[in-house]
Amino acid sequence: MSFPRRQLALLIALPLTLLPARGAAQVAWSGRLGALWTSTMVTDQIAGSTIELRPAVQPALVLEASTPIPGRSRLDASAQLQVTTGTLTSHEGGTNTDVAGMRTLAFTLGVAGDLLPGVRLRAGAGVVSYATSEDASVFQRGAPMRPMGAAELGYRRHLHGPWWLSTAVQYDFHPFTTEQLRSRGYTGSQAVHRVGITVGVGR
């Protein structure tokens, strides 16, 4: 289960554009673990029966780098990478069937600032890339990369020295379709909503 090399290299390299020329001391880092819920990705009707494809709740890893924006705005420029892994499942009439292993890699650039002491709001935009363990179901002709928008409400609490506790509730959305769906006559795309809760540390 792997991402296309060009996409993976691009997503990993983009956060480096946020590093200020004056030194890495201005960059804050954080890492968080948690869970991500995803809405239905595909809805189909076969012989009067509704079939929905969506993953189960997935474990998620979030890595973020941020640096102050020059000026008096008190805002930070932020680069965030989110990785999830789970199983794509078909739901039909109360019966659930595992379709394929699925992983997502989402990268966003955004702006973050404090609403209240310790309470932080972030808004961003970027891309989400899908990968599966096999060419199956809606991924028979390859896994897609799609644009996405994201928002996050977080809380930070000082622990010791430069370290802080970081928690966040995240929301993002993106349009979903694949080449396999288009070949079957699906000309549009379905809005996919994802909500995650993560906890970790930063400095």
Image: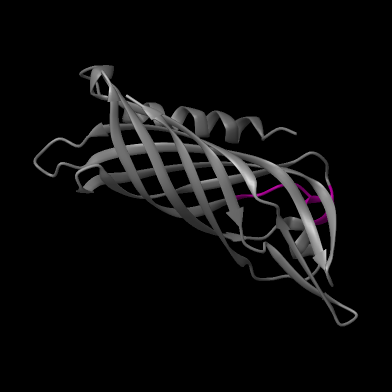
Residue 80 picture location, percent across and down? 43, 38
Residue 86 lies in what quarter of the image? top right
Q: Which residues are magenta?
A: 136-145
Q: Residue 63: give x, y in percent of width and height.
A: 46, 32
Whether residue 140 is in magenta: the answer is yes
Residue in front for this viewpoint, 23 or 164: 164
Residue in the image at 61% along x and 56% along y: 38
Between 20 and 162, the residue placed more toward the observer is 162
Q: How far from the left and from the top, in percent, is residue 132?
A: 75, 42
At x 71%, y 32%, the residue is 2
Q: Taking 147 as reference, is 118 left or right?
A: left
Residue 28 image position (x, y, % from top left): 30, 27
From the viewer's perspective, tell me whether residue 62 is left or right of residue 84.
left
**Residue visible at 29% across and 35% down?**
157
| Quadrant of residue 187 within the rendered picture | bottom right
Report if residue 123 lies within the magenta region.
Answer: no
| Residue closest to the far bottom | 48
Side of 119 relative to 37 (left or right): left
Q: Quadrant of residue 102?
A: top right
Return the residue nearer the eye: 169 or 126: 169
Q: Residue furthest left?
A: 72
Residue 49 in the image: above or below residue 202:
below
